[in-house]
Image (cartoon, coloured by chain):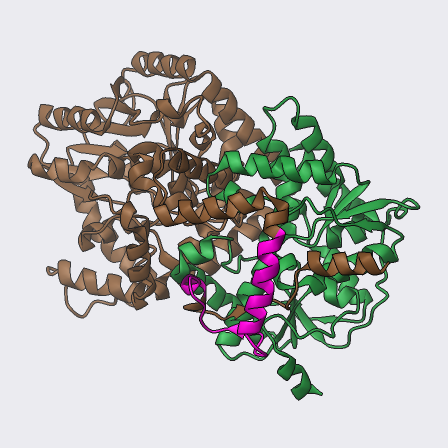
C-alpha cells in the first residue's frame, strides 16, 4: 500500500508541474537490460544507455544479470524466483539507481522482490533498498531525472500501448505521452490502450488460442488508429503485437519507446527486415 | 453439476468458436465497464470507500466466529432458525427436510449462487418439488437448461432473439402473435408467468448479500423485485448463504453498499435493497410463518488463515469478470464450475481442489485489471500465483513446463553460461531468419508461431555488444 501511494504521490507532484530537480552529478546507474532486450533487441538497451547518459548518469551493466526471475515466479517456482532475485540484488545494490527498459521486469524488482524476500531477515532490507532505487526507464527520465523536453525529434503519428505491469504496478501513463509530445510526436490513442495484449509471459504459449483472441482485438484497435508507428515500453508486448500485425499483413512499424526518445531509429522495426527499410528509402 | 474446469482449454476453444456467445459477450466488454467508470467518476471518495469496505471485512474475518454466534443469537431471538451446513450435501438435506415438512409443491427462488454451488435445484426436483427461478436471467437459463455464466447477470451469454425463441417455445398457452421484440415486452411476459407462481408457492428460497450480526438481518440486493415476492408470499422463507456473508452492523452494510452497486452495474444503488429479520411478527400485514437460514461452509473456513483468506472479502459484484480480457474472450461457462472470471479462478481451486481447478489460475496474463477494479481490494493475481505455487509444489504442472523451466532456471542462475548460450542463440536465430527479420515457424515455438510471427534477434546480444564497447573505451 505504502508503495502505491508513493507512486501516486510522485505522479500527482509531476501533474502539478513540479519537475524533480534532476539527477545528482555523477550518479551511477545500473542498467538492468532485461532478457528480451539482451537477446532480441540490444538497440533498445543502447537507446536506454544514451537516454541515461544524456542526463549525466554513469551507466554500468553488471555481468551478473540474466533475467528478473518472472518466468519462475509466475510459474509457481518460488524457490528459483528467490534465488534469481538475490542474484539481481547482489549485482545491482551498489548503484545509486537501477533503470529497466520494461515495466514488467521493473515491476518485478520494485514490487515483487520485497514481497518474495519479506520473510528473510538477511535479504528483506536489501530487497527493499533495491526496490526504492529501481525505476522503469521512462518513469526514471520523467519522475527522477525530471526530463520534460525530449531532445530527439520524430515526425509522424504513433499509437501507444499501455503495458499492464507498467500501468498498474508502476503508475506509468502520462510520462511516455508527455515525453513523446515534447519530441513532436502526434499521438493517436487506440481504443482500449489499457487492455492486455495477450502476451502474459508463458501465457502466450500455454494458452495460444486465448492469447490470439486477445492480440487479434489489440491488432484491430491498433490498425484502426491509422498511426504509422506502434510504441510501448515492454519488449514482450511489442514482440507479441509486432508478430501479430506482421502475420495479419498490417503495415505498422513497431518500436520500443526508448528508440524514439533517443532518436535511434536506424535499426529495422521489431519483426521488420533490412529489406523493409531499403524499400522505404 | 459436472465440473469441467480441467478441460478449460477445450471449453475455451469451443466458446471462441461459438458465434452467438461471441455476439453476447460484446455487451459485457462495453456496457458494464462504461457504466462502472461513470459511477466511479461521480464519486470522489470512491477509493477511500474501497479502503473502508476492505477494512470492515478484514475485521469481520478476524472475529468471524464471534460474529456468526452473535448473528445466530439475534436470528433466534427474532423467531427464526439458523442451520449450520458443513458441506453441500448437508445444506441440501436441511432444505429438503424443510420443504418436506410442509409438503411443498411449488418452490420459488430468488437469485443465489450458493444454490448453484450446492446443486439445489436438481435435488428439489428429484424430491418432487416444482422449482421456479424468479430472477429474469435465472428464469431464462432455467428454461434453457443451463447454468449461470456470470455471477450477477446469469444469462449474459444469451442474446435477445434467443430469449424470444425460448419464450415462444415454452409459453405455449399465450397467443403466438405477441410482441417479444423489446427487453420490456420480454420482461412483461416473464412477469405475467411468474406472478401466478409467486402466489401459489409454498416455500421461497433466497440468497443473501449480507448477514448482519447486530440484528440477525439478511439483506438481498436486486433490481427486479422478484426477491421480495419470493420471500414474503410463501409460508416459509429459507435464506441460503455462505458464512463469509456476515457483517457486524447495519452501518457497515451501508458502507459496503456504496461500492457494491457502483462496481457491479454502475448504479448508485440497486432498485431494491431488502432487509428481512425473522418470520412475520404479530401485527405485520404479511410475511412468512417460518424463517430459516442455512449457513454454508463448504471449504471456506479452511481458507481462513491461509494465503487465500482475502478471497473471503468478495461481495460478488462481478467487476473482476466484467473487466477481464480472458472472460471477454470465452464467457463464464468455459471456467467449468459455478464461479467464473478472476474471482472464480481463485475460489474454484479453494472449494473443489487445485487438482480439479488448477487450470483456472493459470489462464491469466496477470494483467491486474481485476484487482484494479475490485471494490474490496482483493489481490486476485497474487492469489492466482499462490495457486500456481501449490500446483508446482505438488508436481501438478505439466512435465514439459517443469522441464523447460528447470533448464531455463539452471542457466539463469549461471550468468556466464547464460550469456554464452544466449550469444549463440542470438547469432543462430538471426542467421536462420536471414534478412526477413522474423520467423513464420520455428521448432519448439509452435505455441507462438501458430498465430503470429516471431521477431528475429538483431544478431548479437546486448551483453556481447556492451563488452565490445567497453573494450574500445
Q: Is residue A252 above or below residue B42?
A: below
Q: Is residue B138 above or below residue B81?
A: below
Q: Is residue B437 above or below residue A39?
A: below
Q: Nearer the viewer, residue B315 or B291?
A: B315
Determine if residue B45 is in view. Answer: no
Residue B133 falls left or right of residue B327: left
From the top left corner, tell me how far across and down residue A250 is, in percent. 54, 78
The shade of chain A is green
Quadrant including the N terminus of chain A: top right
From the top left corner, tell me how far across and down residue B281 is, in percent. 28, 19
**To which quarter of the image does residue A253 belong?**
bottom right
Q: Nearer the viewer, residue B55 or A70?
A: A70
Residue A215 falls left or right of residue B333: right
Q: Does the magenta portion include A190? A: no
The shade of chain B is brown
Q: Which region of the structure is painted magenta?
A: B419-448
Residue A244 falls left or right of residue A62: left
Amino acid at each position: 500500500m505504502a508503495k502505491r501511494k508513493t507512486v501516486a504521490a510522485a505522479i500527482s507532484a509531476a501533474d502539478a508541474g513540479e519537475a524533480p530537480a534532476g539527477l545528482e552529478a555523477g550518479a551511477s546507474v545500473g542498467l538492468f537490460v532485461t532478457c528480451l532486450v539482451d537477446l532480441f533487441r540490444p538497440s533498445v538497451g543502447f537507446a536506454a544507455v544514451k537516454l541515461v547518459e544524456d542526463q549525466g548518469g554513469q551507466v554500468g551493466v553488471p555481468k551478473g544479470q540474466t533475467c528478473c526471475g518472472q518466468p519462475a515466479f509466475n510459474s509457481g517456482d518460488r524457490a528459483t524466483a528467490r534465488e534469481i532475485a538475490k542474484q539481481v540484488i547482489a549485482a545491482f545494490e551498489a548503484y545509486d539507481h537501477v533503470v529497466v527498459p520494461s515495466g514488467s521486469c521493473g515491476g518485478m524488482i520494485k514490487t515483487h522482490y520485497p514481497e518474495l524476500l519479506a520473510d528473510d531477515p538477511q535479504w528483506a532490507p536489501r530487497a527493499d533498498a533495491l526496490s526504492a532505487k529501481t525505476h522503469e526507464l521512462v518513469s526514471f527520465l520523467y519522475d527522477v531525472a525530471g526530463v520534460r523536453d525530449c531532445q530527439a525529434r520524430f515526425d509522424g503519428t504513433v499509437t501507444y500501448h499501455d503495458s499492464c505491469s507498467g500501468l498498474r504496478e508502476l503508475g506509468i501513463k502520462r510520462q511516455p505521452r508527455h515525453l513523446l509530445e515534447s519530441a513532436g510526436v502526434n499521438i493517436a490513442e487506440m481504443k482500449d490502450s489499457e487492455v492486455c495484449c495477450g502476451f502474459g509471459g508463458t501465457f502466450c504459449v500455454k494458452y495460444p488460442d486465448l492469447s490470439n483472441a486477445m492480440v487479434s482485438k489489440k491488432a484491430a484497435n491498433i490498425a484502426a488508429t491509422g498511426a504509422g508507428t506502434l510504441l510501448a515500453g515492454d519488449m514482450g508486448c511489442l514482440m507479441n503485437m509486432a508478430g501479430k500485425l506482421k502475420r495479419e499483413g498490417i503495415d505498422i512499424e513497431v518500436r520500443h519507446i526508448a528508440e524514439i526518445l533517443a532518436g535511434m531509429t536506424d535499426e529495422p522495426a521489431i519483426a521488420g527486415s533490412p529489406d523493409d527499410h531499403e524499400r522505404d528509402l | 453439476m459436472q465440473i469441467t474446469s480441467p478441460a478449460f482449454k477445450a471449453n475455451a476453444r469451443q466458446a471462441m468458436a461459438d458465434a452467438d456467445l461471441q455476439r453476447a459477450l460484446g455487451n459485457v466488454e462495453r456496457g458494464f465497464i462504461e457504466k462502472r467508470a461513470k459511477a466511479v467518476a461521480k464519486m470522489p471518495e470512491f477509493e477511500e470507500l474501497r479502503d473502508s469496505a476492505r477494512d470492515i471485512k478484514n475485521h469481520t474475518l478476524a472475529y468471524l466466529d464471534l460474529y456468526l454466534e452473535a448473528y445466530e443469537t439475534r436470528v433466534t431471538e427474532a423467531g427464526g432458525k439458523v442451520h449450520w451446513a458443513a458441506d453441500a450435501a448437508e445444506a441440501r438435506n436441511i432444505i429438503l427436510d424443510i420443504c418436506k415438512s410442509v409438503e411443498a409443491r411449488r418452490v420459488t427462488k430468488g437469485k443465489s449462487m450458493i444454490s448453484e454451488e450446492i446443486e439445489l435445484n436438481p435435488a428439489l426436483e428429484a424430491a418432487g418439488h416444482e422449482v421456479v427461478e424468479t430472477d429474469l436471467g435465472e428464469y431464462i437459463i432455467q428454461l434453457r437448461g443451463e447454468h449461470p455464466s456470470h455471477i450477477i447477470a446469469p444469462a449474459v451469454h444469451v442474446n435477445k432473439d434467443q430469449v424470444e425463441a425460448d419464450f415462444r417455445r415454452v409459453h405455449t398457452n399465450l397467443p403466438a402473435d405477441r410482441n417479444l421484440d423489446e427487453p420490456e415486452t420480454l420482461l412483461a411476459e416473464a412477469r405475467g408467468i411468474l406472478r401466478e407462481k409467486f402466489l401459489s408457492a409454498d416455500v421461497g428460497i433466497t440468497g443473501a448479500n449480507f448477514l448482519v450480526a447486530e440484528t440477525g438481518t439478511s439483506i438481498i440486493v436486486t433490481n427486479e423485485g422478484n426477491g421480495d415476492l419470493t420471500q414474503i408470499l410463501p409460508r416459509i422463507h429459507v435464506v441460503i448463504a455462505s458464512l463469509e456473508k456476515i457483517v457486524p452492523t447495519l452501518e457497515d452494510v451501508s458502507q459496503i453498499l456504496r461500492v457494491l452497486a457502483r462496481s457491479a452495474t454502475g448504479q448508485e444503488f440497486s432498485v431494491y435493497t431488502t432487509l428481512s429479520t425473522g418470520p412475520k411478527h404479530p401485527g405485520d400485514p404479511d410475511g412468512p410463518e417460518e424463517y430459516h437460514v442455512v449457513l454454508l461452509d463448504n471449504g471456506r473456513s479452511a481458507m481462513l488463515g491461509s494465503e487465500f483468506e482475502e478471497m473471503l472479502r468478495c461481495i460478488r459484484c462481478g467487476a473482476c469478470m466484467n473487466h477481464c480480457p480472458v472472460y471477454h474472450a470465452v464467457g463464464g461457462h468455459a471456467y467449468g464450475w459455478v464461479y467464473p472470471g478472476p474471482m472464480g479462478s481463485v475460489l474454484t481451486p479453494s472449494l473443489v481442489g487445485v487438482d480439479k481447478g488448477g487450470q483456472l489460475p493459470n489462464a491469466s496474463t496477470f494483467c491486474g485489471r481485476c484487482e484494479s477494479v475490485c471494490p474490496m481490494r482483493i489481490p486476485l493475481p497474487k492469489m492466482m500465483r499462490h495457486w500456481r505455487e501449490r500446483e508446482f509444489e505438488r508436481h501438478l504442472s505439466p512435465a514439459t513446463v517443469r522441464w523447460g523451466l528447470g533448464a531455463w532456471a539452471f542457466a539463469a542462475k549461471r550468468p556466464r553460461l547464460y550469456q554464452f548460450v544466449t550469444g549463440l542463440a542470438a547469432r543462430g536465430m538471426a542467421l536462420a531468419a536471414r534478412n526477413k527479420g522474423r520467423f513464420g515457424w520455428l521448432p519448439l515455438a509452435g505455441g507462438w508461431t501458430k498465430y503470429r510471427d516471431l521477431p528475429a534477434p538483431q544478431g548479437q546480444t546486448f551483453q556481447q555488444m556492451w563488452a565490445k564497447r567497453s573494450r574500445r573505451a
